[in-house]
């Protein structure tokens, strides 16, 4: 039934035209050769194309052999074509591997039958047929791979690049054996291909297609190919001038080739190559650029980073929000000037002004949040088109249904992979980690799984250079009440680990609420992509507006970049932090306000060098400065038992309580190499 559908239905007219085209093409290509032997191009076409087209290829080849009187000399090829066409009609398997194996069997069977019936005079002749059969099978596999991906878009890089390369080289090799008067068809087509690729893909496309052309012509004839040795260099150099007019672009390509000819010496073959170059350039000029767009998609569009586009749109939103805020402020100023000035009204105006200030502050923070998100996307994320193509090819080969897939690199060059799908039952994350690691020759790990509007977002990332081991301990001021401190350790999506301590005002449950709100908000902002300082400002603004009563909390942050090891401290009313770097310990302290007290908070920010084996100790204000020497001694000792250090510090800090007790929190971390 499937074979019947191939020649019936609404597409029958197109099939007729296609078959006619295949007959003409196969008639032309039937006489081509590869290094003196018959070219397997028609056998490759027959083994790759659907049955109706394969039959047309056989028909065109038979017509050529009949009119040229080469039927007897071409019995091996005719037999191979016939068996291949029969197999295409019988078998439904359309995979590239099956097509290649079927073509190999048909070629070997036909060659063996002809040689055995004629008698083996030279074993080398049979070896040539074996090599040609293997070449045909390999070519069928790659031709089928190209056919499966769609032939209307030529990919000279990415997952299909190898397949297109084989198709291109075999086509040029076969065409090079065709000559019309003084012109070589293979070299003319090669020049046209080089110019087309260089115009769209710049120096990369020009150089690559130049190599394909030289390789193809060399395979056909060493003499013919010798004059094309400068094609790759000419394509590379010409690619740098792809923005020029097509006429100038073509002239420049010819000029580079003329210089190459002058360097190696002028011969009859090199002069013929110049004629072919001129003919190929003329063909490039004649064919409209629009006609090539379907086959050579404009690669310049791929330079447009989708991350950059998104960040630009977000930045535009931030600018619009700023304009709205400014316009609203101007309107309020105009209304204030018309106020009558009664005492009661002035009181209400003062209260209103305070609320307005808080509103505009939060609007300003929203602007900063969006702008910071844009900066983070541009600085930390770079879309990786090549690896995105590889991931999509990987998923398609395994018939995994997905909505989108993308690969990114951060500023350190680490690879991130995101796969969005509606159902995760078909995703074997453990298997993916192993295959991604083998595919990219890097160690990968499972990052996160999120659900947004019913869609699953699965993230994988290349393993960072460093990891952080975190340990903590707490001691409440009152045994029957919770600690007013909150300490957490978490990672963002850019390869940073955050150590955070917040100490709520006072102690007990109320202080615990404030510290937990502070830490929870900060974590939510950071994991949402907001930069650190903007996140601190947002937390401060929310804590200010949370209640009319005084309510504040300290915020002590240590950010460790797991790619570079860089340590950044951000402190808002926080206690001292001790850092061990190499064989020394430094103490960092700063006088700043906690969050939730004043409108414009200015946290202390400082960066430090941090490397393998270094450690950090963060403390709440329940730890007296009298304990610092003890902590320093602990850090300089063998830190193999770092997990016990927080408890030992807590026990030591209790000794220095005098009068009112306070909550104690200790958070330690050590940087290790992965």
Image (cartoon, rainbow, N blue to C red):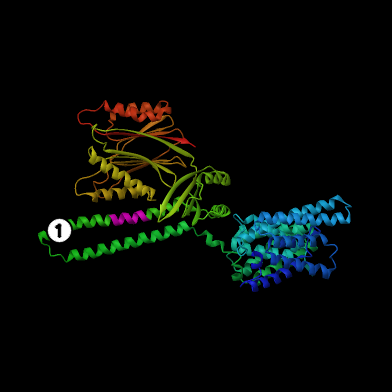
**Which of the 4 image quadrants contains residue 502?**
top left
Is residue 254 something one can see in this rendering? no
Left/right placement of residue 75 relative to residue 196 reads: right
* Residue 647 x, y percent position in the rendering: 34, 29
Asked if 604 appears above or below 267 in the picture, the reply is above
Q: Which residue is mark 1?
A: 348
Horizontal relation, residue 94 to residue 512: left or right = right
Figure check: 344 above or below 488: below
In this view, which residue lies farthest toward the bottom?
Answer: 13
Q: Quadrant of residue 85?
A: bottom right
Which residues fall within the magenta stretch?
A: 362-370
**Closest to the observer, 588 or 524:** 524
Magenta span includes 368: yes
In this view, 165 is above or below 604: below
Relative image position of residue 667 (x, y in whole percent): 35, 35
Residue 502 covered by magenta stretch: no
| Farthest-out residue, left | 343
Q: What residue appears at the point 24 percent right and 39 percent down from the top-left corner?
A: 509
The total of numbered circles placed on residues is 1
Where residue 77 appears, x then y in whole percent? 79, 61
User: Relative to 581, is 176 on the left or the right?
Assistant: right
Foreground residue among 585 and 24:
24
Residue at point 67% right, 59% down? 143
Q: Is residue 439 visible?
A: yes
């Amino acid at each position: 039934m499937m074979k019947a559908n191939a020649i019936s239905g609404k597409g029958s007219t197109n099939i007729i035209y296609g078959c006619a085209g295949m007959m003409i093409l196969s008639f032309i290509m039937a006489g081509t050769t590869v290094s003196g032997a018959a070219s397997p191009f028609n056998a490759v076409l027959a083994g790759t194309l659907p049955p109706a087209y394969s039959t047309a290829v056989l028909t065109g080849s038979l017509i050529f052999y009949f009119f040229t009187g080469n039927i007897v000399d071409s019995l091996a090829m005719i037999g191979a074509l016939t068996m291949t066409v029969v197999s295409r009609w019988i078998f439904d398997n359309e995979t590239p591997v099956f097509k290649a194996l079927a073509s190999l069997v048909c070629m070997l069977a036909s060659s063996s039958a002809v040689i055995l019936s004629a008698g083996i005079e030279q074993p080398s002749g049979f070896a040539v047929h074996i090599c040609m059969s293997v070449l045909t099978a390999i070519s069928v596999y790659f031709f089928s791979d190209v056919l499966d991906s769609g032939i209307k878009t030529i990919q000279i890089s990415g997952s299909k690049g190898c397949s297109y390369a084989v198709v291109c080289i075999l086509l040029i090799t076969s065409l090079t054996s065709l000559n019309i008067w003084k012109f070589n068809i293979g070299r003319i087509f090669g020049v046209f291909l080089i110019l087309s690729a260089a115009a769209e893909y710049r120096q990369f496309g020009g150089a690559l297609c130049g190599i394909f052309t030289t390789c193809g012509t060399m395979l056909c004839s060493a003499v013919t190919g010798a004059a094309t040795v400068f094609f790759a260099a000419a394509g590379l150099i010409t690619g740098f001038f792809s923005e020029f007019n097509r006429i100038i672009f073509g002239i420049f390509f010819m000029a580079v080739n003329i210089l190459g000819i002058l360097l190696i010496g002028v011969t009859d073959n090199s002069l013929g190559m110049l004629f072919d170059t001129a003919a190929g350039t003329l063909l490039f000029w004649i064919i409209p650029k629009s006609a090539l767009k379907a086959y050579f998609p404009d690669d310049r569009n791929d330079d447009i980073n989708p991350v950059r586009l998104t960040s630009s749109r977000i930045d535009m939103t931030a600018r619009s929000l700023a304009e709205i805020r400014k316009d609203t402020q101007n309107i309020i100023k105009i209304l204030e000037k018309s106020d009558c000035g009664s005492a009661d009204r002035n009181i209400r105006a003062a209260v209103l002004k305070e609320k307005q200030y808080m509103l505009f502050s939060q609007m300003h923070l929203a602007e900063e949040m969006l702008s910071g998100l844009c900066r983070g996307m541009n600085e930390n994320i770079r879309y990786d088109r090549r690896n995105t193509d590889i991931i999509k090819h990987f998923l398609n080969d395994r018939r995994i249904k997905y909505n989108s897939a993308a690969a990114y690199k951060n500023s350190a060059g680490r690879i991130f992979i995101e796969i969005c799908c509606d159902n995760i039952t078909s995703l074997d994350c453990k298997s993916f980690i192993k295959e991604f690691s083998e595919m990219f020759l890097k160690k990968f790990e499972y990052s996160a799984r999120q659900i947004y509007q019913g869609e699953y977002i699965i993230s994988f990332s290349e393993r960072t250079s460093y990891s952080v081991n975190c340990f903590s301990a707490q001691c409440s001021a009152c045994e029957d009440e919770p600690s007013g401190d909150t300490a957490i350790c978490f990672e963002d999506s850019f390869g940073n680990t955050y150590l955070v301590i917040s100490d709520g005002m006072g102690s007990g449950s109320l202080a615990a609420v404030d510290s937990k709100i502070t830490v929870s908000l900060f974590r939510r902002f950071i994991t949402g992509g907001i930069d650190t300082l903007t996140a601190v400002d947002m937390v401060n603004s929310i804590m200010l507006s949370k209640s009319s009563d005084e309510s504040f909390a300290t915020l002590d942050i240590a950010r460790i970049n797991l790619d570079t090891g860089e340590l950044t401290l951000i402190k808002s009313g926080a206690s001292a932090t001790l850092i061990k770097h190499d064989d020394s310990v430094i103490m960092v302290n700063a006088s700043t306000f906690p969050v939730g007290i004043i409108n414009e908070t200015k946290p202390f920010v400082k960066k430090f060098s941090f490397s393998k084996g270094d450690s950090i100790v963060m403390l709440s204000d329940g730890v007296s400065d009298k304990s610092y020497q003890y902590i320093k001694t602990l850090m300089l000792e063998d830190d193999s038992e770092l997990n016990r250090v927080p408890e030992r510090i807590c026990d030591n800090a209790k000794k220095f309580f005098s009068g009112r007790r306070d909550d104690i929190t200790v958070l330690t971390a050590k940087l290790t190499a992965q």
